[in-house]
Amino acid sequence: MTVKPATRPARPHFSSGPCAKPPGWAAAKLAVDSLGRSHRSKLGKQRLKLAIDLTREILQVPDTHLIGIVPGSDTGAVEMALWTMLGARPVSMLAWESFGEGWITDVVKQLKLDAEVVKAPYGELPDLTRVNQSHDVVFTWNGTTSGVRVPNGNWIRDNREGLMIADATSAVFAMDMPWDKLDVVTFSWQKVLGGEGAHGMLILGPRAVERLESYTPAWPLPKLFRMTKGGKLNRAIFDGDTINTPSMLAVEDYIFALEWAKGLGGLDALIARASANAAALDRWVQKTPWIDHLAADPATRSTTSVCLKFADDAVAGMDDAAKLALVKKMASLLEAENAAYDVAGYRDAPPGLRIWCGATVDTADIEALGPWLDWAWNEARA
Ligand SMILES: Cc1ncc(COP(=O)(O)O)c(C=O)c1O
């Protein structure tokens, strides 16, 4: 038996979604006047609009881009874009982990488009400089299940012909987004700000709007996906006039998180918190012989969903099933001790650990986590 570390993380919440609530969050602190009323009442509309306006302010989204609250969390927002915009020109689908793969399935198997598929294995990025930008391009800004992110938007041409469609659900509020290079950006409240699942955010640049107003897909669109009326964008959606009924409780929870973020100092402060967390975790990785980063290149390493694998020497002779059993054992030991929740890697990723380092996590808790991971490793191996 190894000795348990003296200090536990104060908030052992390291899940990569839904992520830790903002520090100081409590259900009793949420505004509830909008609950039990119509979301189309004056108050309901005001709260939805406030969520949109604070999103714009904190993410520094330029006035050129529209921001809408849509159904179905991040998946809903991505699928709205894919179903309404694709098919007008050739498509390139980029993927380096499970969620990117999921969008390929949507486009190739469901929409049956003859897309160019560009993939890289877990831990790597494809060569972004070779992406054909005369195509519409669909990619994941931060691959939540591999911990590999796009380092910047320098590879995206200003005069691209296609649309750049980015699933940025585990990137926004933690990484800089080059808005002028992105035509569609999506995310969910349940990620970096620690809100609730349920609703997605769909951000559209002028070229995406132009596509919606000039192109009608060959396939039918359910009401939930329809953003145009008589060939014109239904702009009311982007003022908080949602397509169908949202959860006002989830809206109020998101507003709480946005106000917390604003109080901290906005985007720069959020990015600084995630970077400090990822750096603290990296200090532990660097001094720990049994663990390595899954993302080989530090430039592409996520500062939110940090994915770790066992060092080859430490698990010599073990197959993936044995490594997975080790992960499960460690995760359940840590959970039973209330030292860390939800730190097992994603089911489709190479066996390992995944530690969320987004802005709602406190650096002191990441620092307290390292010794517990060592403890769980020793216990699980014993
Ligand atoms: C990159 C990425 N895309 C999509 C999703 C799906 O998000 P949601 O469950 O909010 O629809 C996730 C969730 O973890 C994700 O990490």
Image: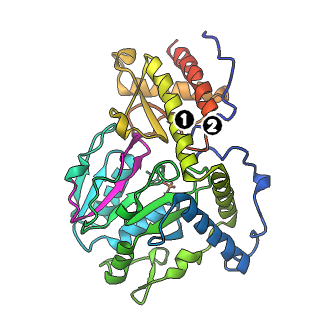
Q: Which mark is residue 362?
A: 2
Residue 146 lies in the magenta-colored region: yes
Residue kind at label 2, given as amino acid type: Asp
Q: Secondary structure at mark 1?
A: helix
Residue kind at label 1, given as amino acid type: Asn
Q: Are marks 2 and 1 in contact (CB under 8 Å)?
A: yes
Residue 179 position by quadrant: bottom left
Q: Can you see residue 181?
A: yes
Image position, residue 255 (x, y; %): 66, 60
Direction top: furthest residue = 1
The residue located at (50%, 35%) in the rendering is: 278
Residue 333 lies in the magenta-colored region: no
Question: Going from the N terminus, do you reach mark 2 or mark 1 first?
Answer: 1
Q: Can you see residue 16?
A: no
Q: Is residue 90 left or right of residue 27?
A: left
Image position, residue 79 (x, y; %): 41, 65
Viewer-nearest residue: 329 or 339: 339
Q: Which residues lie in the magenta part? A: 131-152
Q: Is residue 136 left or right of residue 176?
A: left
Q: What separation in Å lies between label 2 and label 1 (alpha carbons)?
A: 7 Å
Residue 258 position (above or below residue 33): above
What residue would you read off at disc 1?
277
Image position, residue 210 (x, y; %): 35, 79
